[in-house]
Image (cartoon, rainbow, N blue to C red):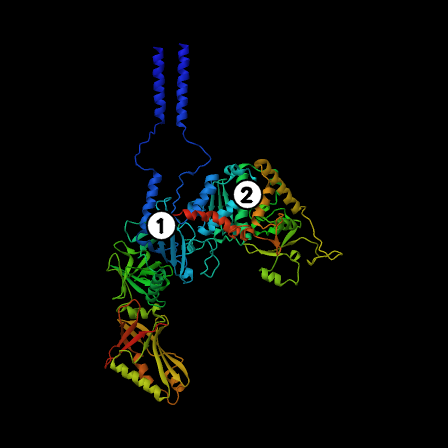
Amino acid sequence: MKAIYTKLTVAVLLVAAMGIASCSDDDFGPSIYDTTEYPLDRSVATFPLDSFVKKNFLEPYNVRFIYKMEDIGSDMDKNLTPAPYDRSTKLAVLSKYLWFDVYDKYGGKTDFLRQNSPRIIHCIGSKSYNPTQGTETLGVAEGGIKITLYGVNELDENNIAYMNKYFFHTMHHEFGHILDQTKLHPTSFNLLSSGHYNAMGWSDMPDSVSNGLGFVTSYASSNYSEDLVEVSSTYITADTLQWVDILNTASYEWEYIDTEYKSEREFYAAQDAPFDIDTVGYFKKSDNGDCKIYRKLCKRDADGYVVLNDSGKVQWLHDSGINGRELILEKLNLVRTWLNESFQFSIDDIRREVQQRQFLTEEDGKFVIKNGSLVNRLVQKVLGDEKGRTLMQKLLDEVNQYKELMTTTDK
Amino acid sequence: MNKNIARFIILVCTAITFTACVNEEDDIFGKTAAERLNEVSGLYTSRLVASGGTWIMEYYPTNSTEAVLGLGRPILCQFAKDKTVVCGMKNSASFNIYMESQSMWDVITDDGPVLTFNTCNDVLHTFSEPHDIVETTEDDELGRGFEGDYEFIITSLEEGADHAMLKGKKRGTYNRMTRLPADVSFFNYLMDINSFTSSTFVPGASELRLDLGDLRYNVSGMSTMLPMIYPREKQLEHDSPVYPYLVIKYKDKYYLRFRSEVGEEANSEQEFVYHPESDCFKGVKDSTHVLRGLEGEEVPLYLASVGGTGFSFIISGENPNSAAFNQAWKDLVDGFKASGNELTNVVLAVGNDGKEMQLKISYKLGRGSTTAVFKAPMEYVEGGLKFGDYTGSSNTVEALKTKIKKDGVPVLVNFLNIFGNGTFKVEGTEKALNLKGIRMEKTGVSPEIVIMGIRNVK
């Protein structure tokens, strides 16, 4: 009898197991979006870009690249507008080229981005102003899921500085937040500039003053979380000359003083020409109307005139005890270690790859410098390209190739 | 026996287990929610693109009653099946230059059927951009802009209908669309309605009258596109209600539609159609509702009010005046000639908040020209205007005589006396939205003196 019960129990369990197995027919793959039935209408004018983003973002990484703005997916308290199709197209190919492809190469292939990339990239055409603070939001990362990029209306491949500020820097900045939200950074980072963060007044501070305090940008001085991702994104996107400039600026200590002058023009007109901008200072009017001069800290007499040393040089002072340059490099080292240990990639590799994709290099890999600046590779002709295309045109052809598949409609 | 029990139990368990996997939900609707939403999208898409897909949208960025945010904007749209849309406009937001832009559109279903212009359109998104508004002088809209919508809930669009109603998703303004012929020229259409509007409602025109059954209103400031409408028995106040409006052309007729209904319940009207034969607008819902110009005694009443200030009328012997007045005119012309001068112009104007009549006589004095102004008090009397004695002018009759060569123009006194201390029955020369002229008939005199004045529009 016991044997029967045993057999019976085994049989029931077996059947139940089969039943459960037969019910679990859902395949919990990596995608939360339906990548097989994604409806692409070949008669719609946006078919080429729709195909490109499906092929290059949705299918490999499970990422929705939304360029047809969905206002419910944006900040409804703000007035924002969609991006033009042509500029969204450029942003899509550049996002792949300067972001996804780079991390694919150095960040652990496709799996790294599948696990860590945002699920949604939302392009907004207009800028996102914060009228009460007098600031502008360049991008937003929400819950590790979504990155919103603003200002696409003004995307111009000829203006690498604008693109760096609004898009590439923002991409890496917001991506940095996502990584931070995925694996927490070392808490020792938070202590490096403790007591110097200024959540409310950072927008009134020029970048150079912030550099002197050990921040790569003024925004970095708003809180340690922004500080962290500003270090990584600035290091990745600022070209060699800009990065050196930041470190040089950070080598000095800065002071800011009140001034009676009400405009930049009025202030500089009152100075004896020629003057040294570092000692005379930078004029800045804050949103509340206060006018201040930001200048490098140096030895001055009672009347405020610079006291030169015996060699006729300015005597720079360091009173705060902060070495901005060393502090920035220390922060970078922590970020470097964190990314290496948590995500197994080298920020230096990422930086080098991004730089080489953005800027023209010699055959030996050295950057080409013209008129004191690196040369924008995107608008240069691609060596050996049989069609004589620029790099941007070649990238755009990855979208244009889908035009051949379109069906015409009677408008 | 036990084996049979065991087999029976296994069979039952197997049956129960697999039954649990059977889809228990009945197909109550036949289609999934997604399919039904897609159908709705397709339905409204097909209705929008039908018959060429050309529409005029009466677009109101916000419900504000102040310039610039409250102004309506006519925007032409042509929706294509490939989901491209071309928009065109010509208004102050485009610095009155024709502007056209192509973008993408779609009907999405996130809040009912929603028409979205989902890639940047330089025409429509001008009103959603957060930039500072260039046409205002103050740099105070950064971050807000016009605050207009570019996603609209389709509240009505029937099959084959020529009208659709859209509700702005964020601002809640109602924006009507009217279907136009597919081949309409955007530029010509906008020129047409702009020209009609600007010539019908000219700056400096008199107030209009709005008759809605028993309800009577005055309409002030139509040329601003933000008119104030207030009960006729009341005075115009700075906070009188503002009713923005737009004019469109549909099937060869001009339609004027206020942003919201005017009046109360049965005696209310939102849209009017222009009737050229009577130069007025009649209600679409009730044709007895009329938006019209001044009529009858409204003319002298208006002239003798604050609103009448600045109105002026050209008086001339070429006008169809009475014979007695034409004779006086001829005498005046001859009198100026005899003194070696030449009469060029006589204008009767209203000044001092409608309390003063000004007779402005211009003449050539040698190689130059000058204007003598004679002023007299003015007041409304039943059906007309009464002028008093000439007062305190810098150019009195005597002064004028000394200025004019030789012995002056003695007959000028006779001419001035026709007006001074006289009472006139005054009415408009024709029923019209704009007061085009007045007919003045002096009372209590013989022979009859009738003076026709043609509205002097600067």
Location of residue B445 in the rendering, given as x and y in whole percent from the top left corner: 24, 80
Amino acid type at circle 1 is Thr
Query: In front here: A270 or A335?
Result: A335
Q: Crowding at label 2, few (<14), some or many (≥20) Cα neighbours within 10 Å? A: many
Nearest the viewer among B398 and A189 is A189
**Residue to which mark 1 is pinned:** A409
Q: Position of residue B20 (x, y in %)?
A: 36, 25
Q: Chain of mark 1?
A: A
- Mark 2 residue element: helix
> Mark 1: which secondary structure?
loop
| Residue at position x 65%, y 47% in the image | A324
Looking at the rendered structure, whether the residues under marks 2 and 1 are on a common chain is answered as yes
**Which residue does the numbered mark 2 point to in the structure image?**
A102
The tally of labels here is 2
Is residue A80 something one can see in this rendering? no
Q: Residue at x 60, y 42 (%)?
A: A349
